[in-house]
Amino acid sequence: MASKYQASRGTFDVLPDQARKRARVERTAAAIFARAGYEPIATPIFEDTELFERGVGRSTDIVRKEMFSFEDKGGRSLTLRPEGTAPICRAYLEHGMHKLAQPVKLSYLGPFFRHERPQAGRHRQFHQLGIECIGADSPLADAEAIMLLSDLLGELGVPGLGLRLGSLGSLGSRQAYLERLKAHLRAHEDQLSEDVRERIEINPLRAFDSAEAGTREVMASAPTIVEGLEGEDAEHFAAVRALLESAGIAYEVDPTLVRGLDYYTRTIFSFDCDVLGAQSEIGGGGRYDGLIEQLGGPAVPAVGWAAGIERILLALDEEEERAGRDAFVAIADDGQRARAMALAVELRHAGLSAEVDLAGRSLKGQLKHANRIDARRVLILEADGSAQLREMETGEQRPVDPGNLVDEMTGGES
Ligand code: HAM
């Protein structure tokens, strides 16, 4: 019976089949993060709206159009977090983590919210997992971050991956570049799409992302930031590249790569997956050396990334085997219900998985159900207190002592 209520547009329920697949992704990520010394952190689902306006940037699509913002009862503007980096930097400052040994290496996982047009791989509530390495400006930190995402996607078996790499330079050189880019855009203003034209002054980089034919033509001859990198910015980028090469990680330098958040400096990267269609970016990130200062803290360099869990699952599109049960405790007589439950609990305490009938089925119905849930063995409690243990694969059945059930069940294990 369909209910008149449905999950809100752009949101979805995670049903058990999907939850099993997610659990594997999360376990794999947690193990990779832990091995590299990235410790879990969790921040609230909502934050002051201003954190994202300042952190992500007022000119970005995220802040301009995609935030789920609301007023609380005290008239304060709050926003469901559209991303995790600004909140983690806020937490880093709030808890004085800049006084700890640097860098502080953090990992996270959870739901994020953006009011986007839903399509395959794009939702309004989605889940990211990611890392932030705060307090290191060495190219080693950039390379380590990229390697961790590469390891994760590799270990999960994501097919058709490509890594694009770019550099935005440091804040100073970026400013000089942006002036050159704006001059180029202004010179070709009449060929640009309205959206790009409106944002020449506030966010000229986004013009590289445009799909509109006229704008693309203008951008084909636009100066790129990678070509113009100088001094320490050029050295940093060369060092990141050399580290990736010596780690055997294939990449392509994409001088037109831009990202949808304003905080990036120097390295930016994106892992794309060619089985994903339009929303092909599975994960990405970069360096954000100015963000913590922007939020009112000291100048602390940092780098990190996030990957979309739904996009990873979409790319994998494989079934996670459902775990069967070690045992089902069935009853031939209603009087044995409480005893069946006690025995199942005893098995669970011994570390085995065990279920009992909760639906008042006949013995035949219980055996059918045990089969359905892939129980390897069924214990049948008779009215007189005796018990039979049935091997579901062979149908073999033998009397057992229910007082000694755990031994019976674990002793038979090979
Ligand atoms: P982002 O590129 O906006 O970066 O998002 C990271 C990933 O989240 C994307 O590559 C994509 O897989 C997934 N994602 C984004 N939006 C959606 C959506 N509407 N539906 C499904 N998946 C989505 C960030 O959020 C940065 N905080 C990453 C970062 C961390 N940079 C430095 N540190």
Image (cartoon, rainbow, N blue to C red):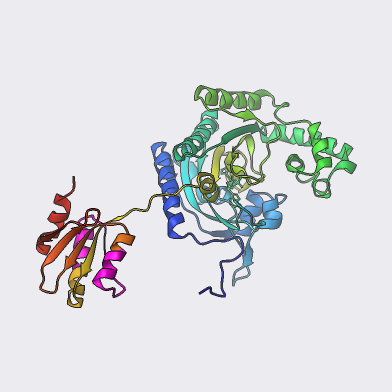
Residue 113 in the image, given as x and y percentages of width and height: 59, 57
Residue projecting furthest to the front? 395
Q: Position of residue 236 (x, y in %)?
A: 60, 26
Of residue 344 and residue 77, the one placed in the foreground of this image is 344
Left or right: where 260 falls relative to 313: right
**For residue 398, side relative to residue 152 (left or right):** left
> Is 44 on the left or on the right of 355, as rendered?
right
Q: In this view, does 43 lie above or below 152?
A: below
State the quadrant of the C terminus. Answer: top left
Q: Is residue 131 magenta?
A: no
Identify the image quadrant of residue 238.
top right
Determine the residue positioned at 53% across, 51% down.
310
Q: Report the magenta residues as a range.
A: 342-369
The percent coordinates of residue 18 (x first, y second) are 46, 55
Residue 46 pos. (x, y %) = 55, 60
Inspect the magenta stretch and tell me whether residue 368 lies in it: yes
The front one of 96 and 122 is 122
Q: Is residue 299 visible?
A: no
Query: Which residue is at the far bottom?
Result: 335
